[in-house]
Amino acid sequence: MWISPPPVFVDPALSTAMGGHPLLARLLTQRGLTTPEAAAAFLNPDRYTPTPPAALPDLEFAADRLYRAITRGEKIAVWGDFDADGQTSTTLLVSLLRDLKADVTYYIPHRLTESHGIKIDALDRLLDQHIHVLLTCDTGIAEHAAIAHAKSRGVTVLVTDHHDLPDTLPNADALINPKRLPIDHPLRSLPGVGVAFKLAQQVLHLAGEDERADDYLDLVALGIVADVAELRADARYLLQRGLLRLQNTTRLGLQALMSSAQVTAANVSAETIGFSLGPRLNALGRLGDANLAVELLTTTNLTRARILAAQLEGLNNQRRLLMDQITAAAQEQIAQDPALLDYAALILTNPHWHSGVIGPVANRLAEQYTRPTILLVTDDHTARGSARSVAGVDITSALKMCGEYLTGVGGHPGAAGLSLPIDNVPTFRAALSKAIDTIRDPRVETGLVVDAELSLDQLTLELAQELERLAPFGEGNPAVTLVTRHVTLEHDRTFGRKGEHREVIIGDSVGHTQKLIWWRGAGLEVADGPIDVAYTLKSTNYRGERVLSVEWVDFQIAPVSAIEISAPQPQIEVIDWRNKDLAQLPVQADWLIWADGAVAAPRAAVRRTDLREADTLVIWSAPCGWRELEAALQRVKPRTIYLCNAAANVDSMEAFLKRLGSLLKHDLNQRGGQVAVARLAAALGHRTITARKGIEWLEASGQISVKSWTDDQIVIAAGTGQKTEEIDTLKAELTVLLAETAAWRAYYQRLNIEEIRALVQRYRAA
């Protein structure tokens, strides 16, 4: 679903102050920036007045105590957390203390063996080094026992954290946490690294070296984006300044990390951190020893920096592979038990999942199924895991409402960790579903938020540059999504090393056209008729010049205006034969039977590439996805539909590859290696993207060679027999695609026929 913002009144003073395209002032107003002063402070960090560090509770005391420890030569221990926010927080505080010649050590627990928080046995090993001050970052706010233990040993405990507050606060000497501030306070959205930076500012002020604070802003930018902090007030200001610092960083570790990620420092943005740098740091925390991140980000040895960056690169590749494998297993569970989707939260369990990456997979599934998702790793007695939520649902609050079933829970509105006895999972699933229905915010709609509608002739480089003034984009300040309605796809071609991306030309009714880039869109179907297209605008550097880049986000079938309908449309009849004996179906000669894949139908059937208009459509076998079903209904425009579910499409890897190999062998022998991908996908009964991925895997396994990839045509030849290093990654990706299709087919079995009727009514009207 697409969500349009409500109409707003734009103050003429704001429009005058902003100048340029009037859309900028409207977008600022939609985002709550209604005055020239507020807009100027938002757009330009030089116009923003940052909040003094002392506004954070206990910060002045903590800074004074740290400065005394530095001047007295007392030993300070920094205890951090293993995610990117914790890594950058730890690095920032360790760097600060080293720069001020303090006696400092640090410790980040290992995720897989110690989990979150402060374990007393590890704490004792640290305190045995004659520690005087324990300084936490990105952790500690709920560590009552550990803090009491440290204080019992005569250690001063200073906590810096940003996580939600427990019912009672621990007895630390200082508790610096922005959640102790009012909900609308400008420091409230600071992540752990932002809190650490504010403390560093105050310590440097006491040392008379205020100007050195900017040296740590590159770390602040990394942590803010990687932790998906809300980009408002001071958090946004620090990111704006931090990006400038990051683009010119002198840290050898960051330079090596950007090099291994193929990132150009001068072009680093919040998007770059979110998609390239942050995941590599998080991969280290999820699969390895996050203490190495501090070494990477502080080392002055270029060779060591490159070695560590290479380790992160390898771990990131491993992370992606594990995530694909877990996603495939999760989709398989849903396909085997579609009733899992009957609950307000999707809860899945598996004893073999890697606990370090289940959080990101839960997030992926939450987005796909638009509901909170929990993945649990189980043993004989306990289930431990991660939860990710969707807009309008505070998942941590919902979990706490189910506390009687849990042995532990902690987190924030969007994500949480939890544990429970394995026998409680079924009753917990039902209880959590009720809790979510109780606390869900009815004002929050889920879907793609569209900022404005434009015509194709309004899309210019100048407009893109105007909109980029709203950057950096992220949580609380999403990228501007625009839409152009009632356009048609006039031409498209695939590109990329494996033809995985798509260049699309769309046109309107008066002859204007626009090129869009659709990343990883090569295998996705687009309807033949008029569509609405959502996209983002960017200005990019191409061969030394700034050019307009339009990136495809989504599309939907263009609704037909009521004025175009000259007569009432007849009611669509949908007849459900999904759970009936198909041998009894009274097939008529003029019925169009749609059957993708290797399926036995009662008489001649057609695949989706050969569908035509007909009054009666028999959907003989389960389609492979929503978009394929929509495209078929639009093409046929039936008045009567028979929903069947002939169990002919097998979605296992073995069956898919066997069928694919047979079809490609035919093309190799009978068509000179010419492969029509759309027809191949229909013959397989799968999405085009899955067919392409299968071809990639066969090539990587040495069974075929691909000579060219152009649009819908691929030319293949006999393979070399040599496997490539991509084979495992491609197999994992293919497994995910097959599992997604299996899950969709399971959902199709339960699909409400009213949804089908509404779709066909719409297409017949067109």
Image (cartoon, grey):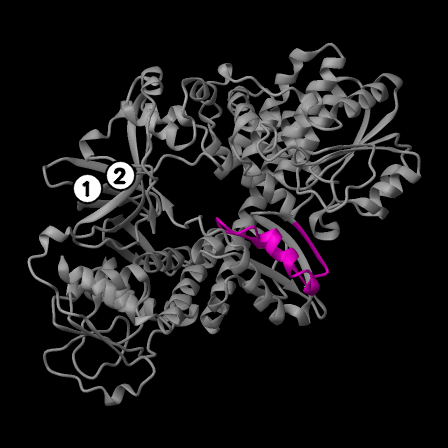
Q: Residue furthest top?
A: 208
Report whether residue 545 is seen. yes
**Dot 1: few (<14), some (14–19), or many (≥20) neighbours within 10 Å?**
many
Q: Name the quadrant containing residue 91.
A: top right
Residue 735 in the image: x percent, y percent?
A: 45, 62
Q: Which residue is mark 1?
A: 506
Q: Which residue is under mark 2? A: 516
Q: Earlier in the sequence, mark 1 or mark 2?
A: 1
Are the residues tagged 1 and 2 within 8 Å (C-beta)? yes
Q: Amino acid at mark 1?
A: Ile
Q: Where does the image place residue 102, in percent across and percent down from the top left?
A: 81, 21
Q: Which span is picked out in magenta?
A: 383-410
Would you call the spot at circle 2 few (<14 residues within 10 Å), some (14-19), or many (20 or more)?
many
Is residue 254 shown above or below 389?
A: above
**81 inside magenta stretch:** no
> At 34% from the left edge and 43% from the top edge, which residue is drawn?
519
* 30 and 353: which is toward the camera: 30
